[in-house]
Amino acid sequence: MENNVIFYLVPAASLLALFFAFYFFRQMIRQSEGTARMREIALYVRKGAMAYLKQQYKVVGIVFIVLSVFFAILAYGFGVQNGWVPFAFLTGGFFSGLAGFIGMKTATYASARTACAAEKSLNSGLKVAFRSGAVMGLTVVGLGLLDISIWYLILNHFVEATASQKLTAITTTMLTFGMGASTQALFARVGGGIYTKAADVGADLVGKVEAGIPEDDARNPATIADNVGDNVGDVAGMGADLYESYCGSILATAALGASAFYGNPDVQLKGVFAPMLIAAVGIILSLIGIFMVRTKENVGMRQLLKSLGLGVNFSSMLIVLATFGILWLLGIPNWVGISCSVVVGLLAGIVIGQSTEYYTSHSYRPTRKIAKSSETGPATVIISGIGTGLVSTAIPVVTISVAVILAYLSAIGFDVRNMLTGENLSMGLYGIGIAAVGMLSTLGITLATDAYGPIADNAGGNAQMSGLDATVRERTDMLDALGNTTAATGKGFAIGSAALTALALLASYIEEIKIALVRAGELTIDVAGRAVDVATASIPDFMEYYQVNLMNPNVLAGMFIGAMMSFLFCGLTMNAVGRAAQKMVEEVRRQFSQIKGILTGEATPDYARCVEISTRGAQHEMLPSSLMAIAVPVIVGFIFGVSGVLGLLIGSLSSGFVLAVFMANAGGAWDNAKKYVEEGNLGGKGSECHKATVVGDTVGDPFKDTSGPSLNILIKLMSMVSIVVAGLTVAWHLL
């Protein structure tokens, strides 16, 4: 009874987050939107963004209906799936889309207000942009925990089974809405990424390089589409992305808690509640951190980073202390060790964040070296950026590897022999899962530092097109450059948590296989000649039963396919950006040549045509790569069975994680190398060095905003799909 009362802290924290999200939104709306011209430009962007989302949600809605019908047939037609799956899947997609929609709506209202506030001071601009970004962060964590709370209460009421089996059934079913969130997030990230980068490339290559006009100049036909793209890609897409990261880590860890403490219902319930409670306390601490962020006038990039770092780091330190208190109060076995796993996750996130900052911020040597290479042309900028991106993978990969081992060892009491033999594997994996929860526990503020970047970018565009004083653009450019760094850092957090969560999802897949075997009437499995009860079989028992080892050709085939998936997915999305960008370049050139008076300011460009090209390109191009991510796990399951699927997930995790870090860091470094030149270094704007770095930034755009960040969703979506169709895989191979 006491534990059930404690659970209600979770929905209470989610409602608190949503309340403050509304409070910050109302604060922002009360700010002045500036002159009539500023309001006009903001309205162009707002209408374009809403038109895009409306069209995207129509396409995604059809996909969701088809998949829900498929899951309903599996559940009610063939009985190989839980009947709640179609409904949980739909709510996951709905809340993920809603989080992105609210964040984007806030951003489109905040940009002009940020520019107007920047007229007063840098701190005023930062405050408006950052707290508008906080609306996104708080909405994501609030809706995520609310959805988790609602589904737990529904399933706890309706699922009938013994106490331990009931919690296992509840947590594995809840993973289904994680699949809905992942599916929506992939469409949002890929579609939004294609949209924004097609517009960005067209605006940069024709406007800045060929026509020689400034960035965000009102004479550029693609500039409104570019500003719209910042919102649909970097706000709506990112919000949906981190919503599924946040929910996925909590749900996977809850499922592992049900497995690790199976047979002891009271402790099992505490293991399920622990990640939810840590996330709930993280919301409160994020709010404290948000109110701490402010800066002074005439400061540099490092001082701005410190201003944001103060809030983030303070929240992170407090969550460490809170975690020890939560797990102690719950009375979870080895609460000290499991709390240390959370500390490991947080430290890993900080290390990855600092590494990302070092390799992408123009305050440091790597990005300045890329800028310096522009003196010999764009080719050396490209080579230098790729080299920097490749080198930058070392620290995150080593960090995650060490974090996995330490989180595992902490959870099992640092028994190395136990780890080597695989005993108590579920408890060790629970430690890894809760490390991922720790890394994302203060997402409310870390996402705010990410989401404010596109707002500052749009504010700069609004200031440029409205003809505001040059000091306003200087201030918004500083906030934008800071936003690029924090966005790269946020991507590092998302990618790191994806690696830890994907490992936890592998164990959840085995748990779903266990349930599928029981549903199919298989109550025992043959492990080395012994008949082992399915209900009490350990993860190593199932690994041995399905021969999951490197000598099994099914595992090897799955691993190769999984590794290939990351590269194939990136190839498809990069080519999609290229095709859409080519159409945009052709349209901008056409308008410059056929609409007389654009470059002299005597005629108004056809902004709507460019918005339409980006919208159509994104809708058309996002389907093949996104649907492939859903289809491949099902096909591999049919052909290679459970062992092949596990190989697929291992291969996609190992290759996808490294490739995602490389692409995000290379793209971020190219972008900030350009901004370093634009600040007056190496000849400044309009110089040959500037043109070379613009080319590098153009290449890096789909790296960091389309393919790279989509990879962490791909990794988890394939895991989620595998879990949801596990019953079908088992039933097919039992025929």
Image (cartoon, grey):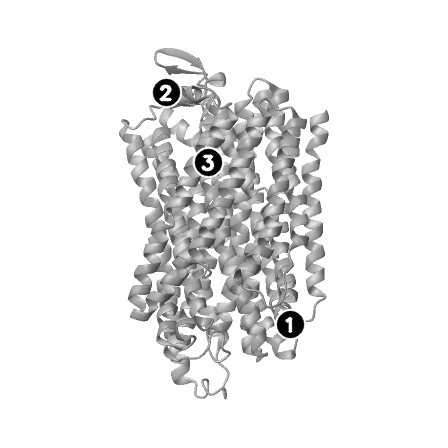
CB within 8 Å, label 3 to label 2: no
Q: What residue is shown with label 3?
A: 403
Q: Residue at x 29, y 31 (%)?
A: 554
Answer yes or no: is residue 250 visible: yes
Q: CA distance from mark 1 to mark 3?
A: 44 Å
Q: Nearer the viewer, residue 453 or 717?
A: 453
Q: Extreme top residue here?
A: 530
| Residue 545 numbered mark, or none | 2
Q: Closer to the observer: label 3 or label 2?
A: 3
Which sits earlier in the primary sequence, circle 3 or circle 2? 3
Determine crowd level at label 2: few under 14, some 14-19, many 20+ residues with C-alpha closer than 10 A: some
22 vs 262, left or right, is right
What amino acid type should be assigned to the residue bearing mark 3? Ala
Label 2: state its secondary structure.
Answer: helix
Q: What residue is shown with label 1?
A: 116
Q: Quadrant of the C terminus?
A: top left
Q: Closer to the observer: label 2 or label 1?
A: 1
Q: How far across and how far down the image is residue 715, in percent?
A: 42, 42
Q: How far across and how far down the image is residue 152, in percent?
A: 63, 34
